[in-house]
């Protein structure tokens, strides 16, 4: 049914909430730690950049999906249509490597969240070694947690999907409540502290990958664009633009309020300590404040946020890797048993997640060097390249927003170098 009405309706609201739910996940639990590292002034600058970065990049990706001559094509099909099958395979690989490191990040995050809770809230000091890399206790705990999350998905995939859908909004309400709850603890003296120009610029630069990671809802853009096309026909681009603008608005208000509330309640030294301990901000708040609500509720929220995000990204990573192997085996003329391949994929995700969680690498470091830059390649650079190359997207040339998205994408990718240097 073609609906070209300009009025906002329930279909638009449904997709706005869907995109919002896709973006809000465990990523925002690490954003305050990085964004507030040098005080409040860099954080204000980051906030001013957030809206344009999130909106313009996701709008460009939606436009790219809608540029297909075949209505209903998903992003992989659009890439193959415009750039050929080799590029389609490359994008499939990039999508996998944009999602797979996130699984590893969440494996480390949930191990540290549970370990910190056992040691600090339940007083099990004898288990303190679970917070250190390579120890036997950490090896056991990480194996149990990563294995349990994968087992839940394998046993009840349909239940997990329904559970995730129902849980995202209570989680958002809880995070909003916590943001308000922290207001009495705000320390406004941070406004009087101005970092040097070098620290100011470096903080913004190295925060961009975490920002891209935390606000990313590109996995839903392909299905969103197709749904807009089915619903609105030739008006799909205009309607998608309005929905993405409104989604960005509520995202920026919600997430940045949470970030500011956390940063105002702590000091830059506290945030640096949270980064050294490699735990989400809620776990650090639980350890920092002698308050039963935060002490027990904070880690629970962090656990649920990480677990639900892990479930969603696991399914995406499994689908991506399955697609890569399927295309390779098909093109090689080799046959394979689908059930056996899926068991092999499950074992791969479990073993690799277990190993990385035991090693305990820096979560923010992994976001800076793997998650954010790879997402930026797909979300920022690919649509801008398409505007230059694809006739169907030439009508979007000559806009300043293209320059902004390209520059911010390149700076985010270049943070790979910054993460190594700093």
Image: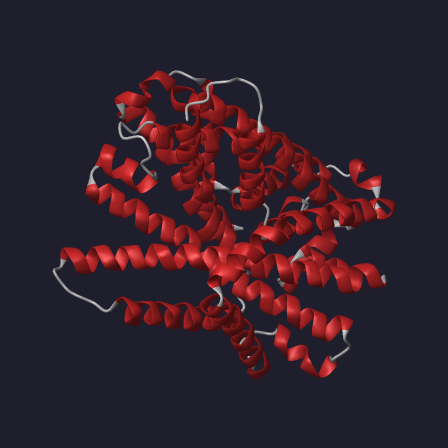
Quick one: 284 or 392, which is closer to the camera? 392
Horizontal and vertical percent position of residue 24: 59, 46
Quick one: 87 or 204, which is closer to the camera? 87
Residue at the spot 25% in from the left edge and 47% down from the top edge? 89
Label count reads 0
Quadrant occupied by the N terminus: top left
Judge whether residue 94 can be spotted in this image.
yes
In the displayed structure, 110 sits above or below 392; it is: below
Horizontal and vertical percent position of residue 140: 55, 81
The residue furthest left is: 333
Which of the 4 image quarters holds residue 137?
bottom right
Relative side of 151 to 230, left or right:
right
The residue furthest front is: 1
Relative side of 259 to 86, left or right:
right
In the displayed structure, 200 sits above or below 60; it is: below
Residue at the spot 40% in from the left edge and 57% down from the top edge? 317
In the displayed structure, 422 sits above or below 144; it is: above
User: How did the renderer colour the structure?
Assistant: secondary structure
Relative side of 9 to 188, left or right:
left
Which of the 4 image quarters holds residue 141?
bottom right
Residue at the spot 57% in from the left edge and 19% down from the top edge? 7
Horizontal and vertical percent position of residue 276: 64, 61
């Amino acid at each position: 049914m073609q609906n070209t009405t300009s009025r906002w309706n329930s279909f638009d609201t449904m997709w706005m909430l869907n995109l919002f739910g896709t973006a809000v996940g465990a990523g925002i639990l690490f954003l305050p730690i990085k964004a507030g590292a040098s005080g409040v002034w860099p954080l204000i600058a980051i906030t001013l950049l957030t809206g344009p970065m999130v909106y313009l990049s996701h709008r460009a990706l939606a436009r790219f999906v809608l540029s297909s001559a075949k209505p209903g094509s998903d992003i992989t099909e659009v890439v193959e249509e415009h750039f050929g099958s080799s590029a389609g395979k490359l994008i499939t690989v990039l999508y996998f490597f944009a999602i797979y490191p996130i699984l590893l990040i969440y494996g480390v995050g949930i191990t540290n969240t549970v370990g910190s809770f056992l040691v600090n809230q339940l007083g099990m000091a004898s288990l303190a070694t679970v917070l250190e890399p390579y120890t036997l206790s950490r090896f056991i705990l990480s194996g149990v947690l990563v294995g349990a999350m994968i087992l839940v998905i394998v046993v009840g995939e349909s239940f997990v999907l329904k559970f995730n859908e129902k849980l995202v909004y209570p989680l958002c309400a809880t995070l909003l409540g916590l943001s308000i709850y922290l207001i009495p603890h705000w320390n406004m003296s941070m406004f009087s502290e101005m970092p040097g120009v070098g620290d100011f610029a470096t903080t913004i630069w190295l925060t961009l990958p975490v920002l891209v990671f935390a606000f990313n809802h590109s996995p839903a853009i392909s299905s969103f664009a197709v749904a807009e096309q089915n619903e609105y026909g030739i008006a799909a681009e205009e309607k998608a633009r309005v929905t993405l603008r409104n989604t960005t608005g509520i995202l920026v208000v919600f997430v940045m309020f949470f970030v500011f509330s956390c940063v105002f309640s702590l000091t830059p030294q506290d945030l640096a300590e949270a980064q050294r301990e490699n735990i989400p901000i809620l776990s650090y708040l639980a350890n920092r404040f002698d308050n039963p609500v935060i002490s027990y509720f904070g880690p629970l929220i962090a656990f649920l946020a990480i677990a639900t995000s892990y479930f969603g990204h696991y399914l995406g990573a499994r689908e991506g890797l399955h697609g890569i192997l399927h295309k390779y085996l098909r093109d090689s003329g080799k046959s394979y048993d689908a059930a056996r391949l899926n068991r092999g994929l499950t074992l791969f995700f479990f073993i690799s997640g277990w190993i990385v969680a035991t090693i305990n690498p820096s979560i923010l470091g992994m976001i800076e060097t793997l998650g954010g830059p790879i997402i930026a390649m797909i979300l920022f650079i690919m649509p801008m390249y398409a505007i230059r190359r694809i006739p169907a997207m030439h009508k979007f040339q000559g806009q300043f927003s293209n320059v902004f998205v390209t520059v911010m994408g390149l700076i985010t990718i270049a943070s790979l170098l910054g993460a190594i240097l700093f």
